[in-house]
Amino acid sequence: MVEPNRVGEFPFRKLDDKKRKSNFAEVQQPYSEEEVMREAERCLLCGTPVCIDACPVLLDVRGMNEAAARGDFKTSYQRIRETNPLLGVTARCCPQLQGLCEDACVLKWSGQPIGIGLIQRYIADWERKHPQQSPSIAEETGKKVAVIGSGPAGLAGGALLRRYGHKVTIFEASNMAGGTAWYGVPDYHLPKQVLINEIDKIKKMGVNITTNVTIGRDVSLPHLLEENDAVLITTGSKDIVNLDIPGVNLDGVLSGYRFLKTVFSNGLEDYLKNPKFKLGSDIIVVGGGDTSLDCARTALRLTKGNGNVIILCRIAKTELRVDPIMFDQALEEGVKFRYLVQVKSFEGDRKGHVKRAVIQKLSMSKPDQSGKSSPIVIPNKEFKMKCSTVLIAIGRGPNSFLQKKSGLSTGRRHSIAITKDYKTSMNSVFAAGDVTSGETLIVKAMEKGREAAQRVHEYLMDLESSHMSFYEKYYTHLSYDRMLRGKKHSDPPPH
């Protein structure tokens, strides 16, 4: 049984909430071919497509819709694959209605925006059943680039560097490529076979991915530089922010990020055969972001839908910055929320396992001169909440391991300091993505990975004085309008 949800002219279907909360089947159900064509027909093919401007990787939404509307899914795929090597991933994981393509769609103001994400998903899934050739590769340059980290930024950057004809090796510390997209996005949101297939396509382009190698421990950064002409660091956000309160070290008080990584790192099936956590029936999640939703919904499924799962938020409901579709789905599945509360301490049993959380009630302060309000504690308004497991998901900082080992200059929260050209303090070493900024969306990490790769390419080929923006590259030299005029482009992005 499926239920409708509001996106585009054709509401997307989703699994029945009573059934889905006990398994990890994908919640969102796809459009049919007829629905895709009809939804794509709604596109106005704007002369100035603001949806493309709103996409961090400049997905050719207009070109995708024009071809999909007439059932030419091959052309539709080719147009959007030009700038996005993880089509099936971003189709599912992008919050399109939050400042991205669907939020910018002009039809939003007269009804419903185009269901861009669902059309993109259909095209990506169509290609899995009808494999297409890899994007074209430029003539080999003889240059070698090492990319450290195989998350979205590293995969996107490595794929672009390979298209330019460079030999690319991506080094991954864990046993599986994908980074946060692999271990941080639950299977009900992103089936991992989708990610595996798209990583395999990047490998087929000639990108070598080496796993179980930690740069800075197994191989030093100076040694890597001896073997390569340039290095691009994309090691992501891994430094976990924890609570500094009494009882935080009790058994059963877990990092939400490590919880997700443990469940998904070796594949969900492996975890279900050999579960590592005894969650119990009363589960508290501390945090107010998308990761707290992922933790809560994953915990609910691991208890077969029988757990009492509550998310504690320091802010008001109106201040939440989460994907509204994911939030609605969490509510449908039975996840509860308490707003304007914070944990003061945890209490344990005789065996040192958490059994209660001491909670303080909060209120919002009066706005300061900038108009900003902050949560403040209400005196003498405490209460206790029983809990068998606590999952803390209050943020991650940039992965600081390599910069501490190698002496790279750092910025806020040990992020790698970079110039506007993505250069670090070490010659021939570049950095991009969450390791330079902190947590962000998958598609925004991909954007930074591609931009840094472009600068690496220009550095290697002595083109730094003639930098061309990606918009010029794809919508002047490889534009939809030129395609309509019959000018075919089989070459990679111009040098």
Image (cartoon, rainbow, N blue to C red):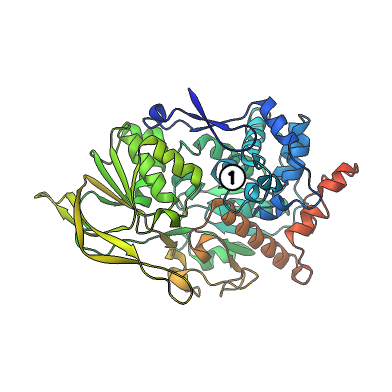
Label 1: which residue? 90
The residue that appears at 55% across and 40% down in the rendered structure is 195
Question: Is 212 left, or right, of 33 in this rendering?
Answer: left
Question: Is 476 left, or right, of 403 in this rendering?
Answer: right
The residue that appears at 32% across and 31% down in the rendered structure is 304
Residue ranking furthest to the left = 350
From what the image shows, is residue 25 above or below residue 46? above
Question: Is 367 left, or right, of 358 in this rendering?
Answer: right
Regarding residue 268, the answer to whether it shows in the image is yes
- Front residue of this view, candidates 294 and 273: 294
Task: Residue 495 in the image: state x and y as whole percent.
Answer: 79, 59
Q: Amino acid at mark 1?
A: Thr
Task: Residue 85 in the image: state x and y as whole percent.
Answer: 64, 45
Q: Residues within 10 Å of mark 1 (few under 14, many from 20)?
A: many
Total number of numbered discs in the rendering: 1
Which picture quadrant has residue 362? bottom left
From what the image shows, is residue 305 above or below residue 180? above
